[in-house]
Amino acid sequence: MPDHSPIRPTNIRTGPNVPPLFLLGLVVTIVARAQFARARTNIYTFRQPDHLVTDGLFRFTRNPMYLGFSLALTGLAVFLGSTPAMLCAVAYLVISDRWYIAFEEDMMRARFGEAYLRYARRTRRWL
């Protein structure tokens, strides 16, 4: 195996900030998913939302699941010391922001109108 392989065990980074970033991302994702379930609303991108969720993690970010996935992917990429994995994490963030979230925001505006606009004014897209 080449010395610079991203999957070679000696490339694993063990800095103090890396595993917590990955775990934080997983926790944020799981908690956000549970909030969707508690609100009995749809979590699928291309389906109409049932309810506007604005409490819990949604008080701090309009997109806690995308944030959680992004944190987990970034933490994993740093942990592995892998440039390709980091590029995948960045690509996920950009695609989520420019395509998925933009699409979802259009649906939310159409479905919830002024209530969504007020929420969007007081709550950031990411953090």
Image (cartoon, rainbow, N blue to C red):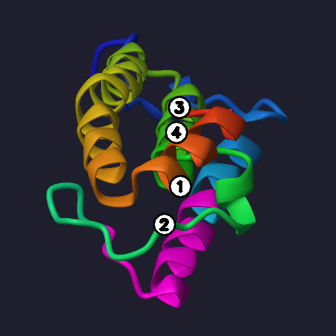
State the separation of the CA atoms marked 4 and 2.
Answer: 31 Å
Q: In which quarter of the image is residue 57?
A: bottom right
- As helix, strand or loop, the secondary structure at mark 4 comes to helix
* Magenta-drawn segment: 28-43
Amino acid type, mark 3: Thr
Residue at (73, 67) in percent of width and height: 56
Task: Choose the circle earlier in sequence order: 2 or 3.
Answer: 2
Tag 1–tag 2 contact (CB < 8 Å): yes
Which label number is shown at residue 115?
Answer: 1
> Disc 3 designates what residue?
74
- Estimate the x, y position of residue 89 in percent, counting from the top left: 40, 28
Amino acid type, mark 4: Leu
Reply above or below: 90 against 89: above
Judged from this view, the residue extending furthest toward the right is: 16
Tag 2–tag 3 contact (CB < 8 Å): no
The C terminus lies in quadrant: top right
Judged from this view, the residue extending furthest toward the front is: 114
> Disc 4 designates what residue?
76
